[in-house]
Amino acid sequence: MSTDATPAPVASEVEIGPPIGLNSVSPDEVVRLAAVAAPPEEGNVVERALLAEASFRGFTARPAAVETYRPPTPDRPWSETRLTLEGVDWEIARGDPRAMVEHLVHPSRSTQLRAISETARLTLGAYRPLGVAYRREGHEWQMAGLIPIRGWTSPGRKTGGRPFDYHPVWDLTLRICHWGWVASIVILTVTGYLLAQPQWIPAGYVDPPTGYFIGYTRLVHYVTAVILCLVLIVRAYGLTVSRIPYDRWKALLPFRSRRDMANMGRVLRGYLFIKPHETPVYFGHNPLQQLTYTSVYAILLLQVLTGFALWSLYDPGQWFLGLFGWVNEVIGTQQTRLLHYMVMWGLLIFIPAHVYLSVRADSVERMGAISSMVSGGRWVRRGAVFEDWPDPQGGNLPAGSELTGSGPDQEPTA
């Protein structure tokens, strides 16, 4: 595991995998300890990625005062940072996990074996695990856990010759779900409107021998509704396991901070072209989008609930459909149908607004909002500043951006 601290000759891309906690330490705490123990002159891509991961998990970029920092050496392949965190004196070590459990920490046999086995497993997956250990107030060293880091180099991509860099923002699962919703909502809207207003159907499709048109329409409506439910389930899974921070549950929740609450009004004014130069720019979802999309998920779930409740009227004895019959009993069948229709019209109001704002973002901000939902990434002008790109110095810089600099305590390569 390299500890070379010379500047990297080529651009690097870095991925932080799911952290592993040991000795009852949570994965979030492992990331926090690794982030606060960064060297004073951090500037390489791995340190930025660690600080961005800590920020995404709810920790500030620099919550501790570093007193001393000892870089790793060939004889001691881990760094040691002494700092004060929340009024407590800490020492945090980062480096080769196997060397740490054999020469620094001296944990229990089970912890040592798990650390070594996890290191071997992660190495097989092209990760270079970063071991994290700590001790407080001069007590014994404890192994906190491991952080999988996977990096790769792109020798053909020079950082000085291009004004733009490409960054992933939406994973494949989200993009498939997005276009699946588009197709499902269009089909459900057309078939649902025909079921509600059959007078628009030409008489030739109602009279024999083609008089089963309404039945086929209802069948298409039901099948598409089931597909919509499956897409929602896949999206929930993607929000849980996605490696891209802008695709996870936390990035979808509105009002995560007072700053975001204040920025929501500024974003709304920008959409209305009121002081657009003051509009805060986000790489992922801005606060207004977070509120809107969370609301859309909620009304989609309401649409599914009322839809299955109406479906249960045709076969109340069926075990699955019978689970939704209580909705009709609580609010009444006609009210359930009315609510179902109102949600449809609400979605029809949202869709043109969504398309307009996407086109506006492409025209005004020029960030490829529409194309990103096809390709999964955006071309961003080098040096751009975003509200949700945390910077280790307290500003805004991209996590995983193409930057050159000295290696971390462990420089990952693959």
Image (cartoon, grey):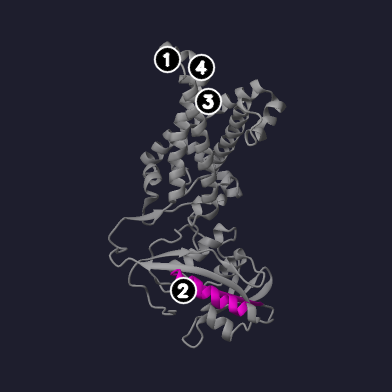
Quadrant of the snapshot with the N terminus: bottom left
Q: In the picture, residue 37 is in which quadrant?
A: bottom right
**Of circles 2 and 3, which is in front?**
3
What residue range appears in magenta? 111-135
Q: Residues within 10 Å of mark 2 (few under 14, many from 20)?
A: many
| Quadrant that contains the C terminus | bottom left
Q: Residues within 10 Å of mark 4 (few under 14, many from 20)?
A: few
Question: How many angstroms separate mark 2 from mark 4 (CA)?
Answer: 65 Å
Q: Is residue 234 magenta?
A: no
| Residue at image mark 3 | 345
Q: Residue furthest front?
A: 209
Mark 4 residue type: Gln
Please say if the residues under marks 2 and 3 sit with CB atoms less than 8 Å apart: no
Of the numbered discs 4 and 1, the one sitting upstream in the chain is 4
Q: Amino acid at mark 2?
A: Pro
The label on residue 209 is 1
2 or 1: tag closer to the N-terminus: 1
The residue that mark 4 highlights is 197
Q: Residue beneath label 2, please?
A: 408
Query: CA gap, disc 4 to disc 1?
Result: 21 Å
Q: Is residue 109 left or right of residue 382?
A: right
Kind of element beneath mark 4: loop
